Image: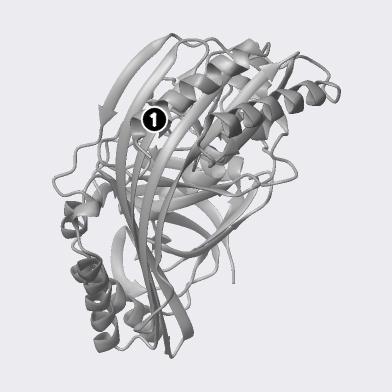
Amino acid sequence: MSFEYGKDLAEYAVQKARDLGAEFAEVRYEQLAQNSFMLRNGNPEISLFTRTQGLGIRGIAEGGIAFTSTNSLNKKEVEQTVEIALRMAKASRKHRSRDIKLADVPSVTASFEIPAKLRPSDVSPEEKAHRTHELDKIMEEIGTPFRMIFMSDYESRKYLYTSDGVSITSFTPRIEAFMMMTMFGKNGPNQRFVQVGGTGGWELVDEWKLESKVREEARILAKVTNEAQKAPEGTLDFVVGSEVVGIICHENVGHPSEADRILGREGAQAGESYMTPDMLGQQVASEVVTIIDDPTIPRSAGYYQYDDEGVKARPRYLIKNGIFMEMLHNRESAFLMNTESTGAARASAFNREPIPRMANTYMAEGDHSFEEIFEDIELGIYMKSYTEWNIDDRRYQSKYVGFESYLIKDGELTDILVFRPALETTTPGLLKSIDACSKGLDFVAATCGKSDPMQGAPVWKGGALAVRIRNVPFHY
């Protein structure tokens, strides 16, 4: 079916909803092409070649709201889906204490296409499969007995149309790759995972230099598995690299800043939040901490120009100089908190509703050089990367276990590898113990999971190249 016909159906659905008395109607039409390849120990797993399209329909009627979807793209089916949505909306109002309304947004008509030198659809399946096999050969040659490679590309063509004047057409190609390797040695089994991702064409795969990255990560995995030593116990200073900074920003700040979590909607699905609305404007971290969620970073995994409710994307300063400044809002949560949407509504597919999500979450760089971060540390640990993490449902108690980690002694970063040190503390304790950030930024890709049914959203996380955390109690 042509994309133009899908757009016509979207507009027809909105008009049908208005004719049936909807106070608000929103329809997203999306065509999605996905190609995925997986190898496990050199053996091909089931590959995915999916082509999906459909309409996601959301309506407000008699103070209630509901979301439905259909992939049967004819007027009769669309009419029935709209009718179901409005019946559900009216029925849902009986179980709510107040009418549902959405924060106002400006009317906008826009069309954009993410540039790609080589679209993923123009690359043959043979070439994509060959790339995964080449990476597997490198891992096998280095001596990785268990390894897994997953590579996927997406092309999304989308049309958003609403009853309050939003009309946005977009084309977005994305690429991602995930690699995991396990080795056995003196320190027992040890594992490393690497994920890359971005918005753009197949040229990203070459820019990532995956072959070099795999060789280097496998080399470090072997050293950690066979040479890393036990770290000293006691109260230590930690320095964490941008990979660890990123997971802290994502888990300890990004998720608890999502307004639907704060309102309790996610409580039975992905957890709640230690943050509350009255914490806005309060000091929640040290003054050197600024954490930003920014969907406008070009070529990033979480890039978009408008969110899935038609709100223009912008950087969100979750924490600025230690102050909790703003939340991640969609239009519904923004209205409930008497504020504006922050353009954080994302849906992973046409058949998922738009909910508050992160995009690219990071800690801003500071004014220290990398070397200065270590200068006055008598005894500490530099956790450059991590191998596992754990956090409670309210995002309050957290634990991050180091992968590539080194001993810091007498103001110097040594080459002594430390085996699996754990940074374990509360979120307020962690954020308030940060006293320095270095110059420079780096990011890693991730897939952020949320909601039920599950929605996986591509994101970046990262930050300053080195962040210093004082006086962390450490023991095995």
Can I make out residue 337 in this image?
no
Residue 248 appears at what percent x and percent y? 49, 48
Image side of residue 447 versus residue 154, left or right: right
Pick whichever, 86 or 417, lies toward us.
86
Q: Residue at x 52, y 51 (%)?
A: 471
Instruction: Compare residues 27 and 422 and report the one nearer the observer.
Output: 27
Which residue sits at x=27%, y=47%?
372
Within 10 angstroms of label 1, few (less than 14), some, or many (20 or more) residues?
Answer: few
Looking at the rendered structure, the kind of residue marked 1 is Tyr
Q: Position of residue 182 (x, y in %)?
A: 42, 81
Disc 1: which residue = 5
Residue 17 placement: quadrant: top right
Can residue 219 be seen? yes
Residue at image position (39%, 88%) is 145
- Residue 315's image quarter? top left
82 or 174, nearer to the observer: 82
Which residue is located at x 65 percent, y 45 percent? 396
Apparent side of residue 94 relative to residue 285 in the rendered image (left or right): right
Q: Is residue 147 above or below residue 160?
A: below
Q: Give the quarter of the figure containing the C terminus.
A: bottom right
Say which quadrant the N terminus sits in.
Answer: top left
**Residue furthest to the left:** 117
